[in-house]
Amino acid sequence: MAVWHLMRWQARVTGPEPVLAALAWLAGLTLVFGTENLSGAETARLLEGYAPVCGVLLFIGLFAPEQGRGLRDCVAARRVPYLVCCALRAVRGALAAAVLAALCTLALWLRGCAAGPRMASAFFVNALFLGGLALLAATAAGGTVAGALPPMAWLLFDQLTGRLGAFSLLRVTTGQGMPKGAVLAGAAALFAAAFGVRHAQLRLQTVEKGVL
């Protein structure tokens, strides 16, 4: 099966809900912050600090469809490994995050805000990091609510206290924190860990079925 056709099939399986939820979050932010003539600091806090929460919405349910609808057998029937399908979903989520980051930054720039490519990149990288953290937590804890807590706690503590220092995600906003290359590497590690945990869970389920 061609990768493109597989991704289209996966899009039908998962539906548009994650992207719509991310759009709703971004639309809500515009009501709070406004979208016209924001200063550099205000724009950076919006794009780097709050907008990346959409990454949680895009990625937290990455492994959920097969659990809820019994689609893993259908995936197996198509001779495509289950985790390969999930990886394609992750790629699609990353593309969606990149498009949202670019469009949101462009929209603010057109409205006279001090937005630019650096802020769009910060938005995108932070969205991947928070999404990877949410996915890992949700996979390990077995629930989306539990999965959302760590990234939201990290971001709120970072925003409200400014005490994360070298581990802050707000380098563009405050001038201190993790370089975006390190944040991107951390995001990749979080996704790899989440896939590793899910793989171990599937192996355990297979062993348990064999015993029974």
Image (cartoon, rainbow, N blue to C red):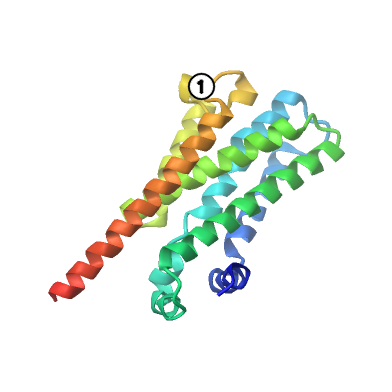
> The N terminus appears in which quarter of the rendering?
bottom right
Q: Position of residue 171 (x, y in %)?
A: 59, 24
The vertical placement of 82 against 157, above or below, is: below
Instruction: Name which residue lies at 62% across and 66% down.
Output: 16
Instruction: Name which residue lies at 26% across and 63% down.
Output: 203
115 or 87: which is nearer to us? 87
**Horizontal arrangement in the rendering, residue 44 relative to residue 114 (left or right):** left
Crowd band around label 1 with a 10 angstrom C-alpha radius: few (<14), some (14–19), many (20+): some
* Residue 68 showing in the rendered view: yes
* Residue 148 showing in the rendered view: no
Within the image, what quadrant is residue 190 found in?
top left
The three-letter amino acid code for the residue at tag 1 is Gly
Instruction: Name which residue lies at 53% across and 22% down.
Output: 177
The furthest residue to the front = 2
**Horizontal arrangement in the rendering, residue 114 relative to residue 61 (left or right):** right
**Horizontal arrangement in the rendering, residue 210 relative to residue 64 (left or right):** left
Count the marks: how many?
Answer: 1
The vertical placement of 19 against 183, above or below, is: below
> The C terminus appears in which quarter of the rendering?
bottom left
Q: SS at mark 1?
A: loop
Q: Position of residue 154 (x, y in %)?
A: 45, 34
19 or 90: which is nearer to us? 90
The vertical placement of 88 against 2, above or below, is: above
46 or 78: which is nearer to us? 78
Instruction: Name which residue lies at 54% across and 69% down.
Output: 14
Q: Position of residue 141 (x, y in %)?
A: 32, 52
Residue marked by disc 1: 162
Q: Position of residue 43 (x, y in %)?
A: 72, 31
189 or 139: which is nearer to us? 189
